[in-house]
Image: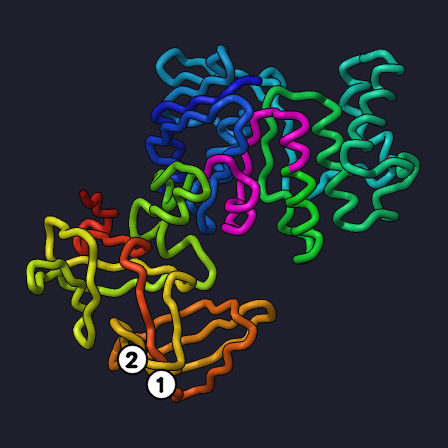
Amino acid sequence: MIGVTLRHVSKRFGEVVAVDDLSLDIEPGSFLTLLGPSGCGKTTALRCIAGLEEPDEGEIQIGERVVFSSAEGLFMPPGQRGLGLVFQSYALWPHMTVFQNIAFGLELQKLPKTEISGRVEQSLADLKMDGMEERYPHELSGGQQQRVAVARMLAARPDVFLMDEPLSNLDARLRTDMRSELKRLHHMVGATTIYVTHDQLEALTMSTQIAVLCQGNLFQVGTPDEIYRQPANLFVADFIGSPKINLLEATVRTEDGQPRLDFGSFSISYPALPVIQEVVAAIRPEDIALSLQPAPGAVEFVIYSVLPAGSELIVQVQRDEVLLTIKETRRQINVGIDQPVWLQFDPDSINLYDKRTEQLLKLE
């Protein structure tokens, strides 16, 4: 297994900065997802690693080999980088069978026929496509075609897997199935994988590491749990999570020597006192407890909207100008619009951000 290192990589298209001074260490055997909205630079960064785009500045290293260096004037072409690529389009030859599509690249390498046959059969078996060798692409479903594209990459046995939104053309159920297959494949093969998506669910469920990008800049790198529970800034907090996180402006004050967060129409206790007073509190919808009866320390709200979503219930509540979203998983709860309810907040699950810089506050 080998890793990938980017040092101060920048790529511009005219006056547009697609990737801005990106430095990233991708550990050997990890599954790192480049996550962000459209136009954030994630695909450009992947194409720079693949050699399909030449950066303007910086250095890219794959394993022990430097494959790009602006300082040394070095640019190694894609075919010499030992990478496997899977893109959004399946890129299968329509006149070739499944076997021929997978074997085509191996034949160009002039590998023995027995080795080619063995690799094709093994890659298809890994993706549960046994017995489909003689089918043509038009005889396959979208999910099966995507598996063939992954099998083709797998058969080439590259050092690093690169995947650019490979599941975006599939329907919701197939995407779920393929996420499971790709995660198991990574566990079996162990190859370093760099995956591009704008779908936060894909990133959270499949990755060992997530790199969040916005407008060409790297905002945070961490495990899925770190990205979800400790977003580095308000952009990451707002981008990650469904339903979206609740962001409330607050003033920090003390009452009887204890810190409190004052939201205007109500206040709650908080375990630590930040160094600034004007903050933004971030509260996940599932971290708010809803009760139909008054309780000590609970704050009264009124139901604004109720959105049943199968196994969960999305409830919006209002108090004066404050509107909050709550995610409830209790099937027996029954609430209606304009009904009074009481909310309790877990202070340990609330992150505070500097209102001016929008950065996470580290509290003692």
Q: Secondary structure under badge 1?
A: strand
Tell me which amino acid carries mark 1.
Pro
Residue 12: image quadrant is: top left
Note whether 157 is above or below 42 in the view shown. Answer: above
Residues in magenta, as a range: 184-210
Tell me which amino acid carries mark 2.
Glu
Density class for disc 1 (Cα within 10 Å; few <14, some 14-19, many ≥20) is some
Q: Position of residue 262 (x, y in %)?
A: 16, 67
Q: Position of residue 36 (x, y in %)?
A: 44, 47
Say which residue label 2 marks.
300
| Total numbered badges shown on the rendered structure | 2
Indicate the colouring scheme.
rainbow
Note whether 355 is above or below 154 in the view shown. Answer: below
Q: Where's the C terminus, which quadrant?
A: top left
In this view, the residue in front, 330 or 248, is 330
201 falls in the magenta region: yes
11 falls in the magenta region: no
Labelled pair 1, 2 in contact (Cβ < 8 Å): yes
Residue at the image point whose x is 27% and y is 58% from the top: 347
In this view, the residue in front, 292 or 145, is 292
Query: Is residue 164 found left or right of 262 in the rendered image?
Result: right
> Where residue 340 is drawn, which disc sits there?
1
In this view, the residue in front, 293 or 242, is 293
Residue 1: image quadrant is: top right
Query: Is residue 225 found left or right of 102 in the rendered image?
Result: left
Query: Is residue 165 found left or right of 284 in the rendered image?
Result: right
Residue at the image point whose x is 38% and y is 68% from the top: 289
Residue at the image point whose x is 50% and y is 20% from the top: 3
Mark sitting earlier along the chain (1/2): 2
Query: Is residue 288 found left or right of 131 in the rendered image?
Result: left
Residue farthest front in this picture: 296
Cα separation between marks 1 and 2: 7 Å
